[in-house]
Amino acid sequence: MIGVTMAGPCDMTVIYLLGGTILSLAGKADPADSAALLRTAGIHLDGPVTVRPFRSVGSQNLTLADLRALAADITLRHAEGVRAFVVAQGTDTMEESSFLLSLLVPTTATIIMTGSMRTADAPGAEGPGNLRDALIAARSLAGHRPGVLVAVAGELHDARLVRKMDSGRIAAFGSPGWGPVGSIITGRVRLAMTPLPAPGPYQWPADRAALRVGLLTVAMDADPLCVQPYADAAWDGLVVEAMGSGHVPQALAAPLAAIAATKPVLLVSRCPQGDTDAHGTYQGDGTAAWLIANGLIDAGSLDGRKARLLLTVLLGAGRDVRAELAGWAGMGVV
């Protein structure tokens, strides 16, 4: 069993339970017994572990407000001296919630996200093992490797790089173009690399509501009509997942430039890895160089879902979007 009898805040690990498959039963709406999950994972509450049932929803129903509340609670406990945190949630939006937390929590906190692909009552359910690995990683890395990581199937993935790659396999997560930053094997954590520190965190006031940011994925021969709704003033920003290194059909070029004249519009690639071609290898209407020259903002190698979260946070925090995105798009460029 994991745990000892005496601990101060610096030795404490806080586990947040948000729901999801790791706490679900097949074909049933009622959640599984969280105490049973902890017991199976070898975690007891006599030692330096505090468990907080924070939400009980499938991760497809998590909201920005939920994650902002979680970030606020982590920030408060971190100020009290806690350095290690574990968050158990559904896997569907874990790549997004992990990245969002990385934008909002103190840079010195170590946060390990985990979940499972099999329900708690399934044969070979991997949830307890993932939760145990996450706790081991949080304790091992606290004070040494701060930031937000995802721990699934014995691998550790950085929040900025991780994506859910499969809808059913246990090893559902990957970091395209990079691979895992580390692993947990037989109770030991090994780090392979540490990504460059990202800008942030950002102070998003609790009394400032989330703004509306759209996400448009561009397909071959896309109709300009798909762009038109985002010209409405109800939308505060837009992320365009363009083809290849940032290109759109010529018919979409002028409508997107018109929107970019009224609100922030970020440009990313719909490819799983790689950057936009901000330097102009390709020229002409609708190329990345043309779009950026006509007001769209280069978001570098971020994928569309994470770029949408970043833009939402920047708007909520009242930051200069273009200036902040210059830091993100230029990360690692020499």
Image (cartoon, rainbow, N blue to C red):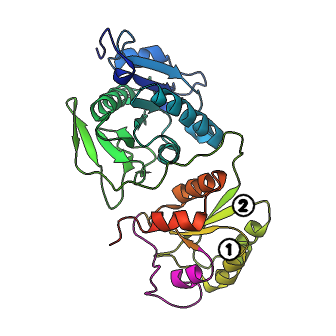
Q: Farthest residue in the bottom direction?
A: 284
Q: Please tell me whether mark 1 sits on a helix, a strand or a loop.
A: helix
**Is 121 inside the magenta-drawn segment?**
no
Q: Please tell me whether mark 2 sits on a helix, a strand or a loop.
A: loop
Callout 2: 10 Å neighbours few (<14), some, many (20+)?
Answer: many
Residue at 71%, 76% (x, y): give it. Answer: 261
Q: Which mark is residue 245?
A: none
Q: Which residues are magenta?
A: 273-296
Q: Earlier in the sequence, mark 1 or mark 2?
A: 2
Residue at 35%, 39% (x, y): give it. Answer: 152
Q: Is residue 320 above or below residue 186?
A: below
- Please, what is the three-letter code of the amino acid marked with disc 1? Ala
The N terminus is located in which quarter? top left
User: In the displayed structure, does residue 268 sit left or right of residue 85?
Assistant: right
Q: Is residue 11 above or below residue 264?
A: above
How far across and down, in percent of the image, does residue 259 sit? 71, 73
Residue 9 lies in quadrant: top left
User: Label 1, on which residue?
Assistant: 260
Q: Is residue 41 above or below residue 111?
A: above
Residue at 48%, 48% (x, y): give it. Answer: 99
How far across and down, in percent of the image, does residue 40 sit? 35, 17
Residue 49 in view: yes
Callout 1: 10 Å neighbours few (<14), some, many (20+)?
Answer: many
Residue 20 in view: no
- Please, what is the three-letter code of the amino acid marked with disc 2? Asp
User: Label 2, on which residue?
Assistant: 236
User: In the displayed structure, does residue 105 sit left or right of residue 291?
Assistant: left
How far across and down, in percent of the image, does residue 309 sit? 57, 53
**Is 289 inside the magenta-drawn segment?**
yes
User: In the displayed structure, does residue 223 sit left or right of residue 304?
Assistant: right
Q: Is residue 332 above or below residue 156?
A: below
Q: Main secondary structure of the magenta part?
A: loop
